[in-house]
Every structure is written in structure tokens, then in C-alpha cells.
Image (cartoon, coloured by chain):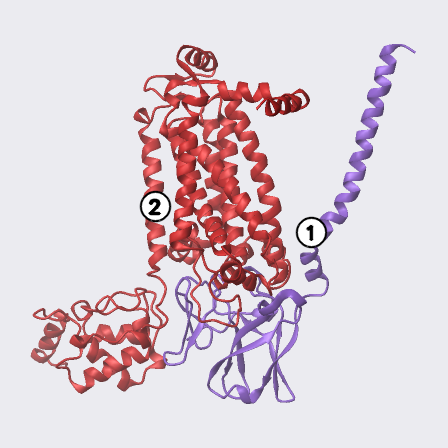
Chain colours: A red, B purple
């Protein structure tokens, strides 16, 4: 014991770190901030450390070469003892990190912690969010499978739409004319050197600012932030009801971080690693590329934007969103901190959460994508065929053979790109059905050139049977009148 | 020599040293930036595209659309499978061909051909194209990208080498005719 003490003294005489660490640990924080609401920042840092450790472990095996990356991932999963577990820890760690960073950001926003004098802390936090998302995207590329390959294609297509410099931006992003070895190498360099370097630098300054400026006090309704009085008020608050950070607040931080790491490990064991999916061979086209969870909302948004609005929104939207986040503390640096007095802040959070949540939900179910194999794998429900005429059944055959089922569902099976057709006969009469099939429209291709008159007749006969029992089909109410009128008054 | 002069002399020397370092930094920045921009500079100089064979014409029967693959002309030994590129070859009437890029004109996902309904469908965001490559429905703003082609010694050649993207539609990737 004495020997350890002697060694510590020897080191401290040279390093002189004991006193600052002691001071840091015991610095006074407002009593209420020793709260479970204040644990997310330290948890994010813990997960980041876990990512560094697991990332280095993966780099021992991973080969950042377009020809070998996928094989090295297979080796990690199956050939190296517990390689799958390290991959799973890194993959789940990435998901947890984004989730915790987002929760931390929401908490900081709702507690008004971005206000004076902590504006720069918030701005660095926004940069940390961006580099964290950058890590997620580049990491998804390093899992070099079909999703990664086509995800790069999507990235290149978006980059190419930048006016004037678009084509050059694509070459720069891909490192060459196509997605290949050079592309993977540069994403490896970004994921392993450039972005982590930025992350470490930003985290360092972010933490330094938290120590220098003190943790944000618990917001009280009516306690308003003013630039000329705040620093004094905060000092009085910590003097009056301050507690040392260690142990009063630190035990919650440490316990929560441990719980998070345990949760990541539990997910890693239970769910296992992410992929890799199919080989990154661009000649295998039987694939439906899908981004990772945290980019699903973007994937959904891209399919709902009208074509004309897509490029401007894609190129300008992110810039505006980032500017709003960066400028927030500079514009709203004073005033109420408590969420109880900031209804617009709460509405903004709710709006963003509902928007991202709905888009993510849609991104999971991709109702806009044709189900590419529905025509050959989803039979027409037998109830829709019983008691039908030969012509109507022939129409059902056309329905399958011409891939109508890929976009239209019957009895909840098949694509959702177009409307479900279970009761189409209630909405469209025979003439309208023929017109829709032949001319298309409303986002449906025209089938006029690919259906013979006989096939069209059969298909429409089948579609006319698609209505709930006991309900009358749609009919043109004016037809009888028009026909009746022409019969009553023959043309002159 | 007074202390003040001494100080100012040192200060000048410090500024001079900083200035020299600035020059060294700028001189080093030129090759570094050029190295970083090399994918762009190379493209400008010679272009990435060249004529690639898709094989004999007998592989592409008249009136049909078939998948063809080729090895990208510019490739490194470590590119592996990513150097193999697919495209759709439509033999219109034995003499006329249309060669479509595999990449959807929306965001580059691989489109699939359905001969029964005469449509190309994209699995990502649901873009659809007619058999002549023109846009049928969905988010794409234009038809499928097309390669230039020529026939030599009974072989079909296309001018390829670069991934087509909406903003990079060079002469080799002009838009297909619109369906009437």
C-alpha cells in the first residue's frame, strides 16, 4: 500500500495532475442537477469510448478493400472467436450513441441550457450531432454489403444534383468514376481518422466548457436569464445550495453509463451483429437497398417529395436545419429556461418527434416501393375467385401476370404503391377502369401497349367483381339519363 | 543596444519565422490539394469512358430486353466485384438497340425489368419506366440513362466507365425518347 502511495506521489510530483483532478471532482454543482435528467451527456461519452475500443478491435481484422471487406466481415462473424460479439457491440453502440445524443439534445433544449453563457457549448453539441451522424453513415458504408453499395449510389446521386459542381462532387466522393475500392478507402479514412479526430476535439472543448461555465442549473419558472446578472446569480446559487460533483451527481452518471453499456451488451448478445447483407456485387440486382434505422426518415422523405421540389429541398433543407440549430442560442440566448413557460419549444420538439417518427415508420414499411415478387409469390385470395366466370378468372390471371399485384394489394397482400383494390368496383365503373388501365395516370404507368384488348376486357371483368358482398358497384348516374334522353329524343 | 530594440528585433525575427512557415505551408498545400482533387482532375483531362464489349449480338434476341454485365474499363486490382457493372440491353429491331444504365434516374438504385408488363421498376422509391426507358411513374424526373453503342464484328460495344447520376448525365447518357 505504501509502495503504491509512493509511486503515486512520484508521478504526481512530475505530472502535477492530482490537484486539478481533485478540484474537478469536487467542484460545486447546484443540488438539483444531481438528477437522473442530467446523465445523458456522460452516457454519450461512455458509449463513444466503447466505440473507440470496439472500433480498434474490429480494425485488427477488417480489410478496407472493396474486394475483401465483405469476406473479412464474414471472418469476423464466423471465423474469429467472439468476432460477432465485437461487431454487435460496435453496431449496437452506434445505435445507442445516436439515440442518447438525441435524448441529451432534447433534454438540454427543454431545460434551456443553451442560453447565456452556454451558447458555444450548444453549438459544439450541434457539431457533435453532425459528426456522430457522419460516423453512422460512414460506418454503414464500411459494412460493405449491398445496402452499403447502393447507399453510396444514393449519396452520389444526391451530390450530383448540386448545381455546377455536382459532377465534380461525385468524383470526389467516390474517388473515381464508379463506386469501387477508392470509395471504400476514403470512407474508411473518414470513419477511422478524420471524423473521430473531430469528435475527440469537439468533445474535449464541449467538456471543458461544461466545467468552466458550470452545469446548467435546474430551470425554475420565472427565473429569467439576463446577460448582465446571470453569472453572479449562478455563482450565488452554487455557493448557497451547491454540492460537490463527486459523489452527489457522479454516482448517477456512473450508474446510468454502466446500465447503458450493459444494455448494449444485452442487445449485442440477443440480436447479434448487423449484417453484412448480400455481397457488394452490382450485377446482383435482386436487391432492395435499405438504409440503417437512423436514416429511414430521409429515405421516406425522398419518396414523398414531388420531383420538382426534391432537389432544392435536398440541397437547401439540411443547410437551413443546421443553421437554425447553430443560431438558436444566439437568437434566444436570454429569457425563460423552464419548459413550463416555453410552449413553442415543447410544440417544436413534439412536431419534430412526430414527423421523424412517422417518416421512420413509413421507411420501415416502404409503402411506395413495389413488392417486386408479389406477382409470383402472393396468390389471389380464393374468395375473390369462387363463383366467378371464366372471363373473370382469366382477368385474375392477367392481374398476376402483368405484375399488378406488385403495386396493388388484395386482402392486405401485395404492394401498397397504388391503392388497395379490394373494393375498387365501388369507386370506378367499367369505363373508368378501362381508362385507368390503358392510360394510367395518378402515378400509375399506362398499360395500353402491354395489354391486348382481350386481356384488358378480362382484367376489367375481374376488377368489376372486387367489391364487398351486398354493395352496389359504381355506376355512371348520367349514363341512364343520357341514354334515356337520346332514346326519347332521337338525333335530328 | 537598448532592451527595447532587442525586444523589437526578436519580435521581427518571430514574425519572419512565422512568415517563412506560412510560405512552407502554402507550398505544401498545393500538392496536398492536388492529390485530394485527383479524381476530379483526371476526369477532366482524359475522361473515364471508353468502348466496352457486352458480347456477341446473339446474346440479345430481337424484341427482348436482357441483362448484360461488363468489367469497368478503369479498375484497380483491389476493386473486386465492384468493378462488375450491369446494364439492360434492349434489342428494338435487330438494327436498333437501347442500352440502359442499371441505375434509376432518381437516386441510382438498380432497376429491374419485368417483360410481362413491359416495365422497369425500382425497388427503392418506386420509380417505373416503360420499355423504351421513358419515365412511367414515381419520383424520377427523367427517363433511364442510356449508353452510346456501336456494333463491330458482330459484337455490341457501349461507351461506359462512369456511374451515371442525375447531375452527371454526359453525352453518353442522354435521355431516352418519351413514350407517346
Task: Give the residue drawn at x 26%, y 86%.
Answer: A454
In percent of width and height, residue A419 lies at 26, 65
The chain ID associated with circle 1 is B
Which structural element holds mark 1?
helix
Residue A106 versus residue B112: which sits nearer the camera?
Answer: A106
Position of A450 with respect to A13 (left or right) is left
CA separation in Å, label 2 and label 1: 38 Å
Residue A401 versus residue A380: which sits nearer the camera?
Answer: A380
Position of B38 with respect to A100 (left or right) is right
Which quarter of the picture shows residue A486? bottom left
Determine whether B161 is above or below A164 in the image: below
Q: How many marks are shown on the rendered structure? A: 2
In percent of width and height, residue B47 lies at 68, 65
The chain ID associated with circle 2 is A
Contact, mark 2 vs mark 1 (Cβ under 8 Å): no
Furthest residue toward right = B1
In percent of width and height, residue A375 lies at 32, 75
Q: Can you see residue B119?
A: yes
Instruction: Read off the residue under disc 2.
Output: A355
Task: Give the residue drawn at x 36%, y 16%.
Answer: A223
Q: Residues within 10 Å of mark 1 (few under 14, many from 20)?
A: few
Task: Give the residue drawn at x 43%, y 36%.
Answer: A257
In percent of width and height, residue A270 lies at 38, 53
Determine whether A291 is above or below A31 in the image: below
Q: Quadrant of the N terminus of chain A?
A: top right
Residue A74 versus residue B77: which sits nearer the camera?
Answer: A74
Task: Give the residue drawn at x 31%, y 80%.
Answer: A401
Determine whether A180 is above or below A438 in the image: above
Instruction: Read off the residue under disc 1.
Output: B36
Amino acid at each position: 500500500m505504501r509502495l503504491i502511495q509512493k509511486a503515486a506521489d512520484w508521478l504526481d510530483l512530475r505530472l502535477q495532475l492530482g490537484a486539478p483532478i481533485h478540484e474537478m471532482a469536487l467542484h460545486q454543482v447546484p443540488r438539483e442537477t444531481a438528477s437522473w435528467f442530467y446523465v445523458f451527456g456522460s452516457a454519450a461519452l461512455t458509449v463513444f469510448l466503447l466505440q473507440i475500443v470496439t472500433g480498434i478491435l474490429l480494425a485488427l481484422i477488417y480489410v478496407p478493400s472493396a474486394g475483401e471487406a465483405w469476406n473479412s466481415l464474414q471472418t469476423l462473424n464466423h471465423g474469429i472467436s467472439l468476432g460477432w460479439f465485437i461487431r454487435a457491440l460496435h453496431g449496437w453502440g452506434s445505435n445507442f450513441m445516436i439515440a442518447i445524443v438525441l435524448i441529451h439534445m432534447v433534454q438540454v433544449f427543454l431545460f434551456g441550457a443553451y442560453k447565456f453563457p452556454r451558447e458555444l457549448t450548444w453549438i459544439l453539441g450541434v457539431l457533435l450531432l453532425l459528426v456522430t451522424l457522419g460516423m453512422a453513415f460512414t460506418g454503414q458504408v464500411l459494412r460493405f454489403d449491398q445496402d452499403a453499395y447502393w447507399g453510396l449510389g444514393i449519396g452520389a446521386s444526391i451530390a450530383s444534383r448540386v448545381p455546377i459542381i455536382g459532377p465534380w462532387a461525385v468524383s470526389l466522393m467516390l474517388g473515381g468514376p464508379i463506386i469501387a475500392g477508392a470509395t471504400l478507402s476514403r470512407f474508411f479514412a473518414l470513419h477511422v481518422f478524420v471524423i473521430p479526430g473531430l469528435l475527440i476535439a469537439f468533445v474535449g472543448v464541449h467538456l471543458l466548457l461544461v466545467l468552466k461555465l458550470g452545469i446548467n442549473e435546474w430551470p425554475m419558472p420565472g427565473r429569467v436569464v439576463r446577460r448582465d446578472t446571470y453569472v453572479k446569480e449562478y455563482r450565488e446559487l452554487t455557493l448557497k445550495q451547491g454540492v460537490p460533483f463527486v459523489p452527489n451527481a457522479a454516482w448517477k452518471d456512473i450508474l446510468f453509463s454502466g446500465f447503458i453499456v450493459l444494455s448494449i451488451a444485452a442487445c449485442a448478445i440477443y440480436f447479434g451483429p448487423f449484417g453484412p447483407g448480400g455481397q457488394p456485387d452490382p450485377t446482383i440486382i435482386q436487391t432492395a437497398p435499405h438504409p440503417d434505422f437512423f436514416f429511414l426518415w430521409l429515405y421516406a422523405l425522398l419518396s414523398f417529395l414531388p420531383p420538382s421540389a426534391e432537389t432544392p429541398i435536398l440541397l437547401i433543407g439540411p443547410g437551413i436545419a443546421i443553421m437554425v440549430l447553430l443560431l438558436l442560442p444566439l437568437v434566444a440566448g436570454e429569457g425563460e429556461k423552464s419548459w413550463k413557460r416555453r410552449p413553442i419549444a415543447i410544440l417544436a420538439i413534439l412536431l419534430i418527434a412526430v414527423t421523424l417518427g412517422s417518416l421512420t415508420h413509413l421507411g420501415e414499411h416502404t409503402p411506395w416501393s413495389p413488392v417486386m415478387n408479389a406477382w409470383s409469390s402472393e396468390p389471389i385470395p380464393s374468395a375473390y375467385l369462387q363463383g366467378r366466370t371464366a372471363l373473370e378468372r382469366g382477368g385474375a390471371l392477367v392481374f398476376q401476370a402483368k405484375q399488378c399485384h406488385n403495386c396493388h394489394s388484395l386482402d392486405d397482400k401485395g404492394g401498397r404503391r397504388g391503392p388497395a383494390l379490394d373494393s375498387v368496383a365501388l369507386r370506378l365503373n367499367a369505363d373508368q377502369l378501362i381508362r385507368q388501365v390503358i392510360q394510367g395516370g395518378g402515378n400509375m404507368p399506362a398499360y395500353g401497349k402491354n395489354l391486348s384488348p382481350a386481356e384488358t376486357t378480362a382484367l376489367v371483368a375481374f376488377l368489376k367483381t372486387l367489391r364487398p358482398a351486398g354493395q352496389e358497384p359504381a355506376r355512371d348516374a348520367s349514363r341512364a339519363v343520357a341514354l334515356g334522353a337520346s332514346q326519347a329524343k332521337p338525333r335530328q | 543596444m537598448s532592451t527595447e530594440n532587442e525586444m523589437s528585433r526578436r519580435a521581427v525575427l518571430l514574425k519572419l519565422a512565422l512568415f517563412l512557415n506560412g510560405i512552407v505551408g502554402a507550398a505544401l498545400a498545393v500538392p496536398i490539394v492536388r492529390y485530394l482533387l485527383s479524381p476530379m482532375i483526371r476526369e477532366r483531362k482524359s475522361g473515364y469512358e471508353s468502348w466496352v464489349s457486352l458480347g456477341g449480338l446473339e446474346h440479345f434476341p430481337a424484341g427482348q430486353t436482357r441483362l448484360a454485365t461488363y468489367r469497368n474499363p478503369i479498375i484497380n486490382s483491389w476493386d473486386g466485384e465492384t468493378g462488375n457493372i450491369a446494364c439492360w440491353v434492349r434489342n428494338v429491331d435487330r438494327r436498333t438497340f437501347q442500352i440502359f444504365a442499371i441505375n434509376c434516374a432518381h437516386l441510382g438504385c438498380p432497376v429491374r425489368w419485368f417483360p410481362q408488363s413491359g416495365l422497369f421498376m425500382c425497388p427503392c422509391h418506386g420509380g417505373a419506366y416503360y420499355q423504351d426507358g421513358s419515365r412511367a411513374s414515381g419520383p424520377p424526373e427523367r427517363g433511364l440513362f442510356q449508353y452510346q453503342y456501336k456494333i463491330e464484328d458482330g459484337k455490341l460495344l457501349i461507351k461506359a466507365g462512369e456511374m451515371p447520376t442525375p447531375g452527371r448525365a454526359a453525352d453518353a447518357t442522354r435521355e431516352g425518347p418519351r413514350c407517346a
